[in-house]
Image (tube, rainbow, N blue to C red):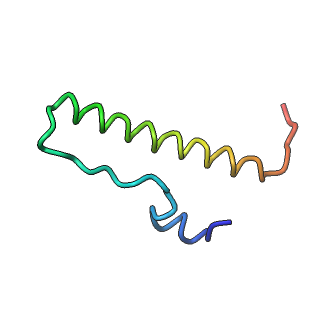
Amino acid sequence: MMDKNEILNSYKWIKVPKYRDDDSLSWEERYNRLNEHHIQETTFLIDKIREIVKDLPDNNQE
């Protein structure tokens, strides 16, 4: 389990490499790379939320 303080006060726990722009690429290639990076980040964060929710007690309230 990660340190709660680290999660609340930093981004170190996000295990997706920081996006690095490459000026030598065309704007379309740059856009596609940035979009792919956002997809990776979003997927990671959704998976992390699901992992956290699994550890919560069930509340079968409707």
Q: Position of residue 41 (x, y in %)?
A: 45, 44
**Seen from this angle, which residue lies furthest left?**
24
Count the numbered circles shown.
0
Q: Is residue 42 left or right of residue 1?
A: left
Pick the front one: 56 or 2: 2
Pick the front one: 53 or 36: 36
Q: Is residue 33 left or right of residue 17?
A: left
**Seen from this angle, which residue lies furthest front?**
24
Pick the front one: 29 or 1: 29
Q: Is residue 52 left or right of residue 40?
A: right
| Residue in view at x 53 percent, y 45 percent | 44
In the picture, which quadrant includes the C terminus? top right
In the displayed structure, would residue 27 be above or below residue 9?
above
Q: Quadrant of residue 50?
A: top right
| Residue in view at x 18 percent, y 46 percent | 22
Q: Position of residue 53 (x, y in %)?
A: 72, 47
In the picture, which quadrant includes the N terminus? bottom right
Q: Position of residue 60 (x, y in %)?
A: 87, 37
In the displayed structure, would residue 61 be above or below residue 4?
above
Q: Position of residue 45 (x, y in %)?
A: 54, 46
| Residue in view at x 61 percent, y 71 percent | 3
Q: Is residue 59 left or right of residue 21?
A: right
| Residue in view at x 61 percent, y 49 percent | 48
